[in-house]
Image (cartoon, rainbow, N blue to C red):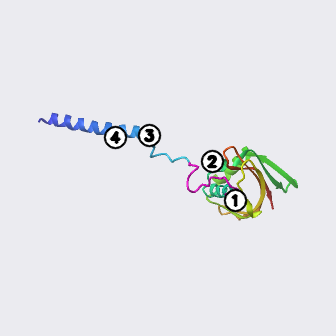
Amino acid sequence: MTMTGQRAKKSSKDLRNLVMVAGLMVFLLSGCLNPFAPEEGDLSSDIWDPQVTVGGLLDNFRTSYALQDSLRYADLIAEEFVFQYFDFEVNRYEQWYRETELTATGGLMSSVDRLDLRWGTLTPASMDTFSIPDTTVEFTVRYMLTAGQFASLNGFARFQVRTGDDGRFRIVMWKDDF
């Protein structure tokens, strides 16, 4: 075989290998498996509770803060959500709604390196396993939140939660009580 023939054979083999690798990459990137993209969260993942009890809702709340997962956090908040807090400057309760809550929480999650949320005992304690469908229920829970290197914030959260059409609890109202 001549030198030109050997080069042509090697070039042909290299071209086939390149086409095979390119084809494999196109298959991987265009199909359901993309090794370069993270998987979106799966609601059935082991770290996430099915959220069919009040305790499960609070577990997912704590986990979404710990992982700083604003998408999971958004799934905890009902469309008609209201957050109430006491504004000491004007000496009265103020409130905001779902969009502002998600913006504020997303900003918090992206601005600190660590969020540690700890829940106290639910009042009444039976709320932890409460799971009656098509029900709105109100309860109070003590919390301690540490955001990054800032001092811990302690208080009581009064929640009103409701099950949705999917049977999962979501927060309708959250009132901070200090």
For the residues marked 1 and 4, what is the alpha-carbon distance in whole angstroms? 53 Å
Contact (Cβ within 8 Å) of mark 1 with mark 4? no
For the residues marked 1 and 2, what is the alpha-carbon distance in whole angstroms? 25 Å
Range shown magenta: 41-55
Q: Main secondary structure of the magenta part?
A: loop
Is residue 59 visible in this depiction of the protein? Answer: yes
Q: Amino acid at mark 4?
A: Val
Q: Amino acid at mark 1?
A: Thr
Contact (Cβ within 8 Å) of mark 3 with mark 1? no
x%, y% of residue 145?
A: 70, 62
Q: Residue furthest front?
A: 132
x%, y% of residue 63?
A: 62, 57
Tag of residue 71: 2
x%, y% of residue 162?
A: 74, 49
For the residues marked 2 and 3, what is the alpha-carbon distance in whole angstroms? 24 Å
Q: Amino acid at mark 3?
A: Leu
Q: Which residue is mark 1?
A: 129
Tag of residue 29: 3
For the residues marked 4 and 2, what is the alpha-carbon distance in whole angstroms? 35 Å
Tag of residue 21: 4
